[in-house]
Image (spheres, rainbow, N blue to C red):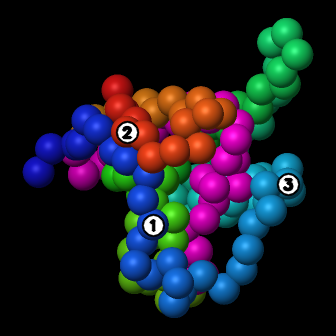
Amino acid sequence: MTLMTTVSTAVSQGAITRITRLFNGTLLDALNEILQNCRRGGATGVTLTTMVQGERTLLSVADDGSGIDDPANLITLGQSGWGDEVARREDPAGMGMFSLAGRYVEVRSWSPRHAAGWKMVIGPDDWEIQRSHRPG
C-alpha cells in the first residue's frame, strides 16, 4: 500500500457514537490535543516555538514521536487513527485538528508504515467546504 497523495475532509461513522467531548477552538484545546498526540506517539521531547509574521503569530511544534501514518486521519472528524491499546486507555476522540478550524495549519510528519515523510497545508478557507488536501 502506498501513501495517499490526496486526502479529503470527512466525518467518521464513529464520530456520533464515540465522541464524548466537544472542542471550541481555544488555544488551550489546540495545545491539549497537540501535546496529547505527541505523548501518544511516544515523544520524549517536544519543542514549542512561536514567531511573528506580519499580523500573524505562528506556533511550531516539533517532537521526536513515531509520526502520523495516515494524513487522512487528521482531517476525518471522529477518527483518531490510534491503535486499539491507545483507544482503550485514552478514548482519543479524533477531533483535535478541528480545534484549529479556520486557521492556517501546516503539518509535516513521517509515516512509519510507508517509510516516507509528508506535508499537508490547510488554509483558513479550506475548512469551509469539502476540499482535497495533498500531502507532499
Q: Which residue is mark 2?
A: 132
Task: Identify whether 123 is placed above or below 34.
Answer: above
The amino acid type found where label 3 is placed reads Thr
The amino acid type found where label 2 is placed reads Ser
- Foreground label between 3 and 1: 1
Q: Which residues are magenta?
A: 90-114
Left or right: 68 as drawn, with respect to 4: right
Left or right: 74 as drawn, with respect to 51: left
Question: Residue 76 in the image: x percent, y percent?
Answer: 45, 60
Q: Which numbered dot is residue 26?
A: 3
- Residue shown at 85% from the left, 10% from the top: 54
Mark found first going from the N terminus, 3 or 1:
1
- Residue shown at 85% from the left, 54% from the top: 26
104 within the magenta span: yes
Viewer-side residue, 129 vs 52: 129
Mark found first going from the N terminus, 2 or 1:
1
Q: Quadrant of the C terminus?
A: top left
Q: Secondary structure at mark 2?
A: strand
Q: Secondary structure at mark 1?
A: strand
Q: In this orientation, does residue 6 appear? A: yes
